[in-house]
Amino acid sequence: MQGAEITTQALPIGQFVESLKSHLKREQSFRNVVLKGELSKFHKHHSGHVYLTLKDSQGQLDGVMWRAARTIPSEIKEGKEVVVIGSIDLYPPQGRIQLVIDRIQLLNNIGLLEAEKRKLVEKLKQEGALDRIRRPLPRLPKHIVILTGSGSAALADMLRISTDRFPNVRISVIGISVQGDNAVPEICKGIDVANSMTTQGYSDSSGLPAVDLIILARGGGAPEDLWAFNLEPVARKILEAKAPLISAIGHESDVLVSDLVADVRASTPSNAIEIAVPDFDDLLFHLSDLQNRKEKTIHDILEDLSQKIEILQLRLSKAPLEGIKSSQIKLGNLDKRLTSSSMSIAASYKHRVGALKSQMNINVSKNIANVRVLLEKSEAILKSTNPKNVINRGYTMMQDDAGKVITSISQIDEGQKVEMRLKDGIITSKVESKRR
């Protein structure tokens, strides 16, 4: 813009290019991309590196294969249609974007397979299988199952690294074919066996911990050799795994369908063990660090409490009178509340006693009246049943010489003396005879 000042804070071009390079390396969509095109240039440098240009009708991109990564089939030459796997990089000295190639293959050998792979990936993506929540790996696995080729170098490396890192981790190995016609069924069967080992029933019957981690591994190879791990049956079986599963197939450049559906992807089998098995020395260091942090926390808490106690002691020493005065006020308030409460309680009880006394007087009067009526009734009954009253009405009561009242002729005998009680005296007589 005309008249605008150029800021003195301009970024140096080299710094900007380095920043751009770092951004490209972090961007996952530019890592391990699979591209196809025609080789328009193909030059093997005396250093061992290969420089080439890949193009089609719409564009072109320079590429390089470093000497350490060179695995180039003899039929690869300029003018051939090829498929490459590589990552985008930026060469700062020349500001040139280039493709760092890890693998190159003729299109007619691998192109059709790649097309099928892309279809499967898209299908799994549409189903949500690639976006599912991945299960976390156990912090310290109790029992790991490794599915890989029996006696392979990859297996030997994994077992060695596991022993070096944490010797007590239990590992079971399920030998499988990792390439060829038997690879797919054996991989699927191996995962089924591993699933059966994750159950409590397996643990109870075997006396071993249940499997809590599965590693599917192979030590790299040509794309066609790894293709079993790009097929749908294997991908489906990985999704059925009952424990977290690590896919560790090949090298960093090999991004397979098994990597996409697994819970964790490892670049190599050795890397899988490094991810899965913690380092014993690191754990000891971590525990020691936790112990030190715990002790420091306890020390800080005690220091804080000590400072608070000192502050309280200082406040108590400076203000004893205030504390006594406050206590006296509180005691005074309590005394007033107690006196008021006592008077209230006394008045309440006095009223209650008066009410009870009145009620008692009423109840006593009622009881006396009831007793008087009962006595009168009893007196009338006694008077009516008194033998003397009966005699006064003209009747006679006969008794034997023992004073027992005679009520039946069967109680006396002829010649026995009896007394007859009249209202004004007693007659003694002798029984001459008796009859019924």
Image: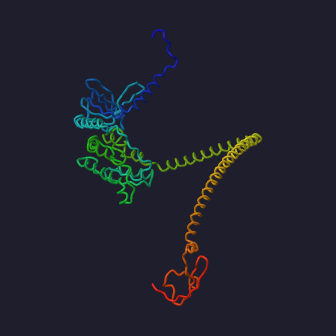
Which image quadrant is residue 200 in? bottom left
Q: Residue at x 36, y 36 (%)?
A: 67
- The residue at the far top in this view is 3
Between 21 and 328, the one nearer to me in the picture: 328
Please, which colouring scheme is shown? rainbow
Q: Can residue 266 be seen in the rendering of this structure?
A: no
Where 209 sits versus 308, above or below?
below
Give the quarter of the figure containing the C terminus.
Answer: bottom left
285 relative to 243 in the view: left or right: right
Between 41 and 164, the one nearer to me in the picture: 164
Q: Residue at x 62, y 59 (%)?
A: 368
Percent across and percent down for residue 50 are 33, 33
Q: How many numbered discs, if any?
A: 0
Q: Residue at x 39, y 45 (%)?
A: 272
Percent across and percent down for residue 106 are 25, 35
Percent across and percent down for residue 140 are 44, 50
